[in-house]
Image (cartoon, rainbow, N blue to C red):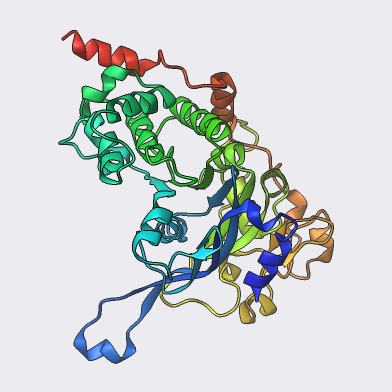
Amino acid sequence: MSENKFTQAAASSSASDVILEAKNLKKYFPIRQSALLAKNRKVLHAVDGVSFQLHRGKTLGLVGESGCGKSTTGRLLVGIEKPTEGEVLYQGKDLLQIKGEEFRKARLNLQMIFQDPYASLNPRKRVIDILSAPMLYHGLETKDTVNRRVDELLDLVGLPHSAKVRYPHEFSGGQRQRITIARALALKPEVIVCDEPVSALDASIQAQILNLLRSLQKDLGVAYLFIAHGLGAVHYISDEIAVMYLGKIVETGEASDVFHHPAHPYAQLLIRAVPSTNPDLRDAFHVPDGEVPSAIDLPRGCRFAARCPYATDRCRQEEPTLQPLEGRPGHMCACFYPITENTADNNPASDASKDSIPLNSGNEGLLSAMNSQKTVHPIKTTCAETDVAGKEGR
């Protein structure tokens, strides 16, 4: 089974280093149908056999197109959704098997940052109420000490103390995302699932939030599952990358290796699809033929075969499993014909790789912004302070 091979490949790290592990996670959503079709009820395969390990103080980037199951995977890990099948192991304990007080204590260490900060913050509550509520509920702070702890959280995310008396609508998108990060940190978790936390922000604000997350990880030792479809952001913040397509992980490995030398055709497609400021490359990207298969009626064989330039009859009949790549420790790929320097010579189906686009193209805008924003700690005198001060003076 691919899950066992993935686990064996990661066995070089000590067991105590693994803080969270997913084993053969599956989540199927039933499709509503009329009573006449009830006997042939269909399901949507949102997550279909996903396995990975998350290490203490490290970041695993989970990347893929919209609808591939990334966010559902994150929601399964923190218990928002219940899996159809599989295990979620936190410090070796299956969260699906423990209950009561034991589950509550474990769940405190698993928090989530949502994609839309405005939708995830209660518009009727002030920042101090939003941040203090979980600490008071779980008994981590008292009414006498919670105000000091809120100030500490605002310091961590680079917001002024005066922000705590404001409401979510009074902040910009980047400031609201800082508030959601503070809320995730309130219970001192060991794992945070970041569900596309920068996708709705412009490049310069993305850079600030990414550098903030890296700084917090360095200071607090928290582990991240970073979900996104922007390869530049994922490569920048991640130690490892897992590429997901139609409910399955198709490639995984060390971040730089996956980003600069993708082995799966789909991973290469994602990287080449990143917009580039180089005019010589703007028209060079070729949109693959074929449609994305339905997650309800899955195709036989490889799920990417209909869009893959290297697909053969074997790909359309057999489904590949994650296999370690020769000469590339820790790098695994679910493909019968993984891309190498000699792909064109070895692949029986295509020579499409002969005119390949440089894989380090694109991301110039984001990476430039990241480099210009690099700081060890978040800057407190940002637009947050100016914005709040301006509103106080009105």
Quadrant containing the N terminus in the rendered view: bottom right
Q: Position of residue 153 (x, y in %)?
A: 38, 28
Q: Is residue 294 visible?
A: no
Residue 297 is left or right of residue 42, and the answer is: right
Task: Single out the residue that lies furthest toward the top.
Answer: 393
Q: Position of residue 371 (x, y in %)?
A: 60, 23
Q: Position of residue 392 (x, y in %)?
A: 20, 12
Q: Position of residue 252 (x, y in %)?
A: 65, 56
Q: Residue at x 78, y 61 (%)?
A: 325
Which quadrant would residue 59 be assigned to in this image? Answer: top right
Tell me if residue 208 comes above or below residue 19 in the rendering: above
Q: Residue at x 64, y 54 (%)?
A: 16
Q: Is residue 343 visible?
A: yes
Q: Nearer the viewer, residue 196 or 152?
A: 152
Q: Residue at x 47, y 71 (%)?
A: 26
Q: Nearer the viewer, residue 169 or 140?
A: 140
Q: Residue at x 35, y 81 (%)?
A: 42
Which quadrant would residue 155 be assigned to in this image? Answer: top left
Residue 214 is left or right of residue 169, and the answer is: right
Residue 334 is left or right of residue 54, and the answer is: right
Quadrant containing the C terminus in the rendered view: top left
Figure label count:
0
